Structure formats: structure tokens, C-alpha cells
Image (cartoon, rainbow, N blue to C red):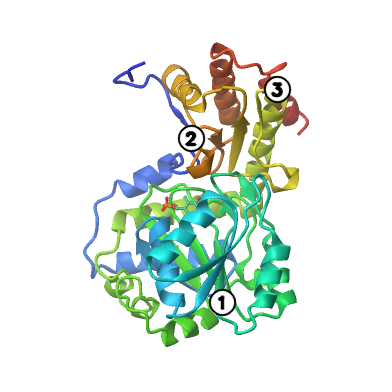
């Protein structure tokens, strides 16, 4: 099937990043940039910093990068890991492993806990590794909150408790790239030292911005760390001048967009945003439950309470080709899905459901997926769309 040159109507973008952009964000970004000395730019940056702090529930410093999530990951590694120190990276799947490989490529040493497919972080294994680290060579725990490849969200409070139980002073670093703006997160109550985020998922922005929130303890570790760095250096970026905060020209139009996106989130209200995501995720989960009765599909996440409100990974069995399904869904029904990453390639397809989305939009997407499933001859029991409707009609 060759792609048609024009998409009639709306294409429903259900990749778990990049996500759909609200019109308000598109309009804000279509403004002309301003010069670097314009006070409007300082006001926009201050607004974005304040909004991100409010969203993260933190007093920590927020530092933004013209980069994607991998850039923000790199910032964490080069600022926190002094030569000889280690990062403990609990297994969550593709994203924990990618962060581990990036850390090692930068010369860092990594201790992993095993990833159990379909399961959240093994907090007992984390506690044990920390207890056995008697020389305290582990400088930090780098944890992925929602692993976007597996659709599993881990319990961060349980992880914090495991670090505390081990009595280990490791910094607690959390990647909320795929969960921020979707589920509640309270950096300071969690006693997270560093948080990593990016623009193109729950924040409803285009790709291109990564950011970190860094508390005093983490800043002190960075200051004492001799690892060479420049662009990513936290000390260099904590400056009153906008130009220096970005180590060069700020991504001005993305910042305009972020200002608009944060305004949308706070006008709707955080509780309403989280409730909307819960409702939309519930509809998707109800549909997958229905489809699974045909025996060919099922949840990749085996723990219902850990099923992400951002993205659902649907495991396929018995010769089902998720890539053919994606092509059919996209080209025939205008629903964009994602495939399996890393070890899950060919084993799952993924439905993103975060950001600028509502219940009726997700019903449309589920109906498109269901039509594609039927056309592919994949058994889906009595179907998933009626289950999603039933879920939504329950209120
Ligand atoms: C998307 C994602 C990243 C990486 O972000 P990029 O912008 O693609 O570099 C990191 N962590 C998680 C959990 C993600 O979902």
C-alpha cells in the first residue's frame, strides 16, 4: 500500500510521543521569534520554569535544554557520575536499557537489576543491590517511571522506600518523560533529587526540548564531579541571563509553545487532567480486554495496577504481524500506532493515549484499530469497542 499524498480529515496520532499538538500550542509557536535582549523572552522563560516546577511539585531548579529526552539523560550522566562511581538502573525494559547503554558509552559504570517482562521495577532487587554496595560506589539510582516500550508504570514511592530501607545515600533520579502531565507526580514529597522530562509526550509540545529539575543535594554532587562537560553542565546553566541558561540561543518558539501548553494544563486543572487520562486509559484497557478474548492479543503488562495511563502495549501471538496491522490502521483508517521497540519488536503494537485527547477521540482510534484487526482476520472475540463504550458509559 503506498501512502496517499493527502490525508483526508484528521489523522489520529496515537504514538506515545510525539503526541498531538493543541491548536493553542500551534498558534503560540507560529509567532515571530524575539531578540535575545527582549524582556518578553525572559518573561516566557520564567513562566516555563515556574510552570514546570508547579507541575513537578518542586522547589528544585529547572534547567531546560534544546534537546530530546536522550539529551536530558546525558545531562544526568555527565553531571552526576564522577569517575569510578556507578549508576544503579532498575530494569523496566527498553528505556532503562537504553539509558544504561548511554551511561556506559559515556564511560560510566552501571549496575542493573533484572527486567521481568510485563512487570514493574523489582524493588526488592534494588534494595538488595544497595545493601550489598558497602563501599557506596553507587552514586545514584536512575529509574524510569513509565517505560514507554512496555506500557508499565512502576510505583515510585515503593522504590523510594527500598532505597531508604537499604540506608544507602544514593541520589534518586526519576525519568518522568512519559508520565508527566498524565498521572500525579510530587518530586519533593517523593524526595527525588533529579527529575528528567521532555516536551513531546504528555506536555503536548513538538519534540525538541528536554529538561531536568535538580535539587541542592544533586547540585552539590555535580559541583564536586570533575567529569568534563560543557553544554550539559548544570553550574553553567544556573545563570540569570537567558542566553547563558540555554548555552546559546534558546528554542524561543518551543518556549512560546510550552508557555501555552502549561497554561492549558493549569486552566483545565491538574486533577481534571489526570482524571481525563484515567478515563481515556480505562477505555483503551477495556477494549484490549475485549480483544484479548479472541486469544490472539493481550496486555503486555501483567499487573493491572501498573498499566500505564499514557500508553498501552498490546502483545500479539500466533503469527499476528503488528507491522502489517499498523500500516493498515494508518493508511486505511488514519490511526497512527507505534510498534515494538528493542526486544519487543514484532511482539507488540502500542496505542498512545496521552496529552491533547478525549474519550470520543480515543473511541474513534479504537474503532479504527478494530476495523484493521478484523480486516487482518485477527480473532478479537466480541470486539473491544463495545467494551470501551460500556466503560465510558459507566461514568
Ligand atoms: C520518549 C522517552 C525517552 C526519550 O525521549 P527522546 O525525546 O525520544 O529522546 C526517555 N524516557 C522515556 C520514558 C520516554 O518515553
Residue that lies at the very extreme toward the bottom in this rendered image: 224
Q: Position of residue 185 (x, y in %)?
A: 63, 60
Q: Position of residue 67 (x, y in %)?
A: 35, 58
- 2 vs 1, front mark: 1
Query: Which of the marked residues, 1 or 3, is nearer the chain's N terminus?
Result: 1
Categorize mark 2 by other alpha carbons within 10 Å: few (<14), some (14-19), many (20+). many
Mark carried by residue 338: 2
Check disc 3 and report the residue beneath it. 295
Mark 2 lies on a secondary structure that is: strand
Q: Nearer the viewer, residue 370 or 324?
A: 324
Mark carried by residue 356: none
The N terminus: image quadrant: top left
Compared to 383, does 92 lie above or below? Answer: below
The C terminus: image quadrant: top right
- 3 vs 2, front mark: 3
Distance from the alpha carbon under mark 2 to that under mark 1: 35 Å
Compared to 156, does 178 lie above or below? Answer: above
Compared to 212, does 308 lie above or below? Answer: above
Q: Nearer the viewer, residue 76 or 206?
A: 76
Residue at point 47% right, 55% down?
A: 98
Query: With 274 as the anchor, is 99 left or right in this view?
Result: left
Check disc 1 and report the residue beneath it. 138
Query: Which of the marked residues, 3 or 2, is nearer the chain's N terminus?
Result: 3
Distance from the alpha carbon under mark 1 to that under mark 3: 44 Å
Categorize mark 1 by other alpha carbons within 10 Å: few (<14), some (14-19), many (20+). many
Compared to 294, does 52 lie above or below? Answer: below
Residue at point 37% right, 80% down?
A: 227
Amino acid at each position: 500500500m503506498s501512502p496517499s499524498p493527502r490525508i483526508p480529515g484528521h489523522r489520529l496520532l496515537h504514538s506515545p510521543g510525539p503526541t498531538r499538538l493543541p491548536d493553542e500550542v500551534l498558534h503560540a509557536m507560529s509567532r515571530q521569534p524575539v531578540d535575545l535582549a527582549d524582556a518578553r523572552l525572559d518573561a516566557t522563560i520564567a513562566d516555563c520554569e515556574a510552570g514546570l516546577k508547579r507541575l513537578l511539585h518542586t522547589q528544585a531548579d529547572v534547567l531546560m535544554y534544546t534537546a530530546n529526552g536522550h539529551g536530558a539523560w546525558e545531562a544526568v550522566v555527565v553531571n552526576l557520575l564522577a569517575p569510578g562511581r556507578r549508576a544503579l538502573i532498575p530494569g523496566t525494559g527498553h528505556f532503562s536499557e537504553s539509558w544504561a547503554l548511554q551511561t556506559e558509552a559515556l564511560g560510566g559504570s552501571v549496575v542493573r537489576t533484572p527486567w521481568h517482562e510485563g512487570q514493574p521495577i523489582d524493588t526488592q532487587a534494588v534494595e538488595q543491590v544497595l545493601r550489598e554496595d558497602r563501599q557506596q560506589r553507587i552514586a545514584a539510582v536512575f529509574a524510569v517511571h513509565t517505560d514507554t516500550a512496555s506500557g508499565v508504570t512502576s510505583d515510585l514511592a515503593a522504590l523510594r522506600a527500598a532505597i531508604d530501607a537499604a540506608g544507602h545515600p544514593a541520589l534518586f533520579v526519576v525519568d518522568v518523560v512519559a508520565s508527566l502531565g498524565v498521572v500525579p507526580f510530587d518530586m519533593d514529597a517523593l524526595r527525588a533529587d533529579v527529575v528528567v522530562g521532555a516536551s513531546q509526550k504528555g506536555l503536548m509540545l513538538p519534540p525538541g526540548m528536554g529538561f531536568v529539575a535538580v535539587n541542592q543535594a544533586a547540585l552539590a554532587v555535580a559541583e564536586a564531579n570533575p567529569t568534563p562537560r560543557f553544554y550539559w553542565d548544570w553550574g553553567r546553566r544556573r545563570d540569570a541571563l537567558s542566553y547563558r541558561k540555554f548555552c546559546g540561543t534558546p528554542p524561543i518558539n518551543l518556549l512560546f509553545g510550552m508557555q501555552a501548553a502549561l497554561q492549558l494544563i493549569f486552566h483545565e486543572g491538574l486533577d481534571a487532567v489526570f482524571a481525563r487520562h484515567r478515563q481515556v486509559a480505562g477505555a483503551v484497557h477495556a477494549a484490549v480486554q475485549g480483544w484479548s478474548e479472541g486469544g490472539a492479543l493481550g496486555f503486555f503488562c501483567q499487573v493491572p495496577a501498573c498499566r500505564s495511563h499514557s500508553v498501552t502495549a498490546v502483545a500479539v501471538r500466533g503469527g499476528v504481524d503488528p507491522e502489517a496491522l499498523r500500516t493498515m490502521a494508518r493508511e486505511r483508517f488514519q490511526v497512527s500506532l507505534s510498534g515494538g521497540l528493542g526486544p519487543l519488536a514484532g511482539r507488540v503494537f502500542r496505542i498512545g493515549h496521552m496529552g491533547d485527547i478525549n474519550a470520543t477521540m480515543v473511541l474513534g482510534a479504537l474503532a479504527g484499530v478494530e476495523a484493521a484487526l478484523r480486516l487482518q482476520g485477527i480473532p478479537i472475540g466480541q470486539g473491544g469497542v463495545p467494551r470501551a463504550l460500556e466503560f465510558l458509559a459507566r461514568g
